[in-house]
Image (cartoon, helix red, strand yellow):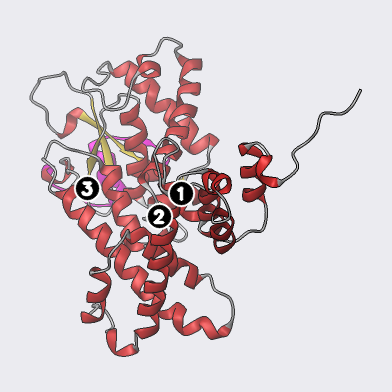
């Protein structure tokens, strides 16, 4: 039997095959532009919202793809053009900068051109990152200026977010979110996101739940959803959660207070605390507090002198409480539970009742 005739030329191939060829080759954007100008068939394959231009964009600027949702309609050819223009503008500005634009602490009018840039700021920032990743000694001056500009842009954006966060109503308490903003502001060149921090803490919560199932398979924390208004109020059930947290954080994951290098700034930043598994009282308390609240245990932060603590209410709901109705948790000290007197022994001095009070997210 005679074989079925195959396609006699490129344009007779199925569209998905043509897309595969154009996406998998070493063709540049200029090449794709020329290919799409040859005939209607190839122009349709290289449509601006199609896979070919998406792949051109991805290969050229891979770090930007995280900003796009798979379900969004995107004109990839237009995005390519806008990103290309932003890159040229960024390089033009970096080249024009000189040392007179910088003071030791405060940026001056040299940044006004940047603030008035057209187009997405993420494109401009991405080009600055590309400059920072350039190789060769000749790029050192450009890298110096690019780093200065990138610091300024990101810190201004984070500062605006932090200001908006602090204007939230007093009943809005997301201690973790505030800590992440501070972390981002102090480390503007690091890739730190609230979502990533949440995901890492969620993995710790899952480990605590696994341990909790071995203690009480019907524990309400196992079905508790973060954000629920009603917390778990039975002291015995709360105690089981805290025992599970202590086991996971300090025995299983080996978190510990950093006594040997207490004043290292890394001890304060949440992304570093989670990576290095060590911190100071306030950062360790924040981690402990967040995990406990996600499991329905209402711990509260206490800015105790020289040693941040958490307090755990032992009194009846609705009753008038004083400082002796709480157990105080030392997250820096492996979750040890302290009485009022033991808190004073911890710092070696007597303190007034006012210093055992809870602090809110803005303080």
- Which residue is more in the foreground, 196 or 80? 80
Left or right of residue 2: residue 46: left
Is 340 inside the magenta-drawn segment? yes
**Residue 103, image x and y in percent?**
27, 84
- Which residue occupies 23% across, 59% down? 159
Q: Earlier in the sequence, mark 3 or mark 2?
A: 2
Taking 133 as reference, is 268 above or below it? above
Which SS class for mark 2?
helix
Marks 2 and 1 sit apart, C-alpha to C-alpha, by 7 Å
- Which residue occupies 55% across, 63% down? 30
Residue named by callout 3: 303
Q: Which mark is residue 5?
A: none
- Which residue is more in the foreground, 214 or 313? 214
Highlighted range, magenta: 333-353
Q: Which mark is residue 48?
A: 1
- Which residue occupies 64% across, 43% down? 18
Which SS class for mark 1?
loop
Q: Earlier in the sequence, mark 2 or mark 1?
A: 1
Badge 1 density bin: few <14, some 14–19, many ≥20, Cα 10 Å: some
Which picture quadrant has residue 228? top left
Q: Which mark is residue 78?
A: 2
- Which residue is more in the foreground, 121 or 289? 121
Marks 3 and 2 sit apart, C-alpha to C-alpha, by 52 Å
Look at the numbered discs 2 and 1 and tell me whether their residues touch, using CB distance below 8 Å.
yes
Q: Earlier in the sequence, mark 1 or mark 3?
A: 1
Quadrant of the image containing the N terminus = top right
Left or right of residue 274: residue 45: right
Is 277 inside the magenta-drawn segment? no
Which picture quadrant has residue 261? bottom left
Left or right of residue 300: residue 237: right
Residue 272 appears in the figure: no
Which SS class for mark 3?
loop
């Amino acid at each position: 039997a005679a074989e079925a005739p195959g396609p006699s030329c490129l344009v007779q191939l199925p569209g998905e095959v043509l897309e595969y060829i154009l996406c998998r080759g070493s063709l540049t954007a200029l090449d794709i532009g020329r290919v799409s100008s040859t005939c209607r068939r190839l122009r349709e394959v290289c449509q601006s919202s199609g896979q070919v231009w998406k792949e051109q964009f991805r290969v050229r600027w891979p770090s930007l793809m995280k900003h796009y949702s798979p379900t969004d309609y995107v004109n990839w050819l237009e995005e390519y053009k806008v990103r290309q223009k932003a890159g040229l503008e960024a390089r033009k500005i970096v080249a024009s900068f000189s040392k007179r634009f910088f003071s030791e602490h405060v940026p001056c009018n040299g940044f006004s051109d940047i603030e008035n840039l057209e187009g997405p700021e993420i494109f401009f920032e991405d080009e600055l990152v590309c400059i920072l990743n350039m190789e060769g000694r000749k790029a050192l001056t450009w890298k110096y200026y690019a780093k200065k500009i990138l610091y300024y842009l990101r810190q201004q954006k984070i500062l605006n977010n932090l200001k908006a966060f602090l204007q939230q109503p007093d009943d809005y308490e997301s201690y973790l979110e505030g800590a992440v903003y501070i972390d981002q502001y102090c480390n503007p060149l690091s890739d730190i996101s609230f979502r990533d921090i949440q995901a890492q803490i969620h993995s710790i919560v899952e480990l605590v739940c696994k341990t909790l199932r071995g203690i009480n398979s019907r524990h309400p924390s196992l079905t508790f959803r973060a954000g629920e208004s009603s917390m778990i109020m039975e002291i015995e059930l709360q105690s089981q959660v805290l025992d599970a947290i202590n086991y996971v954080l300090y025995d299983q994951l080996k978190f510990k207070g950093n006594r040997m290098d207490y004043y290292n700034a890394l001890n304060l930043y949440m992304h570093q605390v989670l990576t290095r598994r060590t911190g100071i009282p306030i950062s360790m308390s924040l981690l402990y507090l967040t995990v406990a609240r996600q499991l329905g245990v209402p711990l509260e932060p206490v800015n105790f002198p020289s040693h941040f603590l958490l307090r755990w209410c032992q009194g009846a709901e609705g009753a008038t409480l004083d400082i002796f109705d709480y157990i105080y948790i030392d997250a820096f000290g492996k979750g040890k539970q302290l009485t009022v007197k033991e808190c004073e022994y911890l710092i070696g001095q007597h303190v007034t009742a006012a210093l055992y009070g809870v602090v809110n997210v803005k303080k």
